[in-house]
Amino acid sequence: MKGLLELPQLGDNPDAPFPPTGEALDSPNGLLAWGGDLHPQRLLTAYRSGIFPWYSEGQPLLWWSPAPRCVIFPDQVHLSRRTRRRYNSGAYSLSADTAFDDVVDACAAPRNHDAGTWITSDMRRAYSGLHRMGFAHSLEVWREGELCGGIYGLAIDAVFFGESMFSRCVDASKIALVALCRQLHAWNYGLFDCQVGNPHLFRMGALQIGREAFEEWLEHLAQQPGVPGSWRGRVRFEPRW
């Protein structure tokens, strides 16, 4: 594996282009560059190019473009019968962009006795800024007035780039993902980027596509309008699925 210093290093100019994604490493899969910062313009350029930051506190800022890419086509998201029954019970309610920072904090909390997180303090500040700019969004799941699940990510052009989700109640993160995909489909968003796949996502309809196909989708959907600005009060959730 290349040493970090052998990879391209980003400078201070947030408008500078990234290296071609085809230069990303095979191992670790997708590592492309390091350095730079989380300036809003740099982040928007990165995501539009199929690149995202992923690093831990104390590490250099690392930029990735893995292949194959895990995606969900919003109209193909899968909802299990059990999850459908749980949502239809009326125990959960949904909202969008009402508790963005709380969702990010919950996603950053340690899981499975692991004290580490890749959602660093700098990442939280950067995505909170993008939320205020109308690019970063959250979908919240509530039970008895308490936040019990959610998901957040970036909506750029007609693509949603999922970052993380969490669950404090059974199926809460699944409900968040399905509700978000249904709304994205209604708004003609063509792709939900999951970045890296796992069995949980594959069971819900995620699949893997090659880098060339993924970037063709990004280029195509860049020509399609998204829904800019805050989504608060603009999402109408179905009471039953």
Image (cartoon, rainbow, N blue to C red):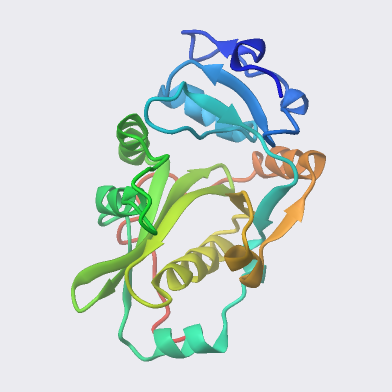
Looking at the image, which is closer to me, 185 or 76? 76
Rendered-image quadrant of the N terminus: top right
Q: 82 above or below 189? A: below
The image quarter in which residue 198 lies: bottom right
At 49% from the left and 65% from the top, the residue drawn is 177
**In-image side of 172 versus 2 (left or right):** left
The image quarter in which residue 39 lies: top left
Percent from the top left, x then y, of residue 223?
66, 40
Q: 212 above or below 169? A: above
Percent from the top left, x then y, of residue 239?
39, 84
At 62% from the left and 16% from the top, the residue drawn is 17
Q: Which residue reaches farthest front?
A: 113
Looking at the image, which is closer to me, 81 or 223? 81
Q: Which residue reaches farthest top?
A: 12
**In-image side of 233 versus 203 (left or right):** left
Percent from the top left, x then y, of residue 72?
65, 60
Q: How many marks?
A: 0
Percent from the top left, x then y, of residue 199?
63, 65
At 60% from the left and 58% from the top, the residue drawn is 188
**In-image side of 17 versus 177 (left or right):** right
Q: 11 above or below 173? A: above
The image quarter in which residue 234 lies: bottom left
